[in-house]
Amino acid sequence: MGLPAILEDSELIDAYSEAVIRAVEIVSPAVVRIDGVRAPGRRQRNTESEPAAGSGSGFVIAPDGFIVTNSHVVSGARELTVTGSDGQRHRADVVGDDPDTDLALLRASQNEGHLPFVTLGDSDAVRVGQVAIAIGNPYGFECSVTSGVVSARGRSLRARSGRLMDDIIQTDAALNPGNSGGPLVTTRGEVIGVNTAMILPAQGLCFAIASNTVRFIVSRLLRDGRIRRSYLGVAGQKVPLPRRLVLHHRLPAASGIRVLSIEPGSPAESSGLRQHDIIVAFDGQPVTGVDDLHRLLTEDRIGVRSELIAIAGADRRQLSVVPADVVDRSSSRSREVPR
């Protein structure tokens, strides 16, 4: 039947308040403010004589000083400082950075291994409508708390690198500049997301990277210092396919990727793929646009021969390609981006 009918509205409000207070008491000691000094050439305001400082939020996930935050919080910073809820400041170094999921892992130096830390929860268990609490440092106001509900799960959001991020949690817990990188938590004090973006001027449209994504990315950053992904070496754009071609070749979708350019010496060039070909499938999976191809080009595809289906004019071409490892991330973002 739910809550006993004898509960008054005031008691319900008190119960809600106690739940939020309990979660904040558990999590807030592990939330840090991150300040960075931008490297020369990344000045945010041309009137400044010194490189601009950026700031954001993060949270400690292990007592030896590992901190999760957003990639865009630390991007381009030549010096990073983290300040805990107790006011202690530590220099921090970037352990790994993945702009494609907007996540970064830092490690605070000069700590004695006793930093408060939080637990990553299971974002797959999150239910729409449950209470969500955001903690961060908006506009420098340290350890600010807002609460709301989980508005939706499984959203997609484009990272600043151009890749589409999947499994994003939508919430109406208010976020502001400076909240980026802070935790989104349950009333039990478990982190279910990393606050990453808001849509302005809309009200109550805020987004967090799911904790299960965070767990996977952090494990890889600890192991390799980066996220390994495969690449083909093409630049292209999504285009519709004529209905007659879709029917004639029994294609699963009515769109694909028109190849605009091919990087010399790349796996795509070695496969025989040509400019103006339209990629419609990779390794047996339909490819309707660049985002589909990005999702398929994962670490486990590196060095594995795969089938590539392309349409050239009215002909169907079946090619064999061996995706390679993306070593230089900056160059990888120029290889396969939507236009």
Image (spheres, rainbow, N blue to C red):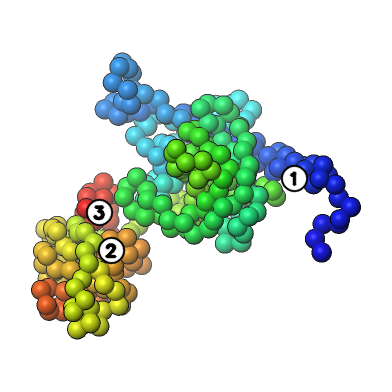
**Disc 3 secondary structure class:** loop
Residue tagged by mark 1?
Answer: 16
Tell me which label, 3 or 2, sits earlier in the chain: 2
Q: CA distance from mark 1 to mark 3?
A: 45 Å
Q: Nearer the viewer, residue 74 or 242?
A: 242
Residue at image point 48% right, 54% down: 168
Q: Where does residue 220 sit, x and y in percent of width and height?
A: 44, 55
Tell me which label, 1 or 3, sits earlier in the chain: 1
Q: Nearer the viewer, residue 257 or 3?
A: 3
Q: For this view, does 170 lie left or right of residue 189?
A: left
Q: Which mark is residue 147?
A: none
Q: Residue furthest right?
A: 6
Looking at numbered disc 1 in the image, what kind of residue is underneath it?
A: Tyr
Q: Mark 3, residues whose alpha carbon is within 10 Å: few (<14), some, or many (≥20)?
A: some
- Is residue 112 among the parts visible in the rendering? no
Of tags 1 and 3, the one toward the viewer is: 1
Q: Mark 2, residues whose alpha carbon is within 10 Å: few (<14), some, or many (≥20)?
A: many
Q: CA distance from mark 2 to mark 1?
A: 45 Å
Looking at numbered disc 3 in the image, what kind of residue is underneath it?
A: Val
Q: Which mark is residue 289?
A: 2
Q: Which mark is residue 337?
A: 3
Residue at image point 12% right, 73% down: 312
Q: Where does residue 2 sit, x and y in percent of width and height?
A: 80, 60
Q: Are marks 2 and 1 in contact (CB under 8 Å)?
A: no
Image quadrant occupied by the N terminus: bottom right
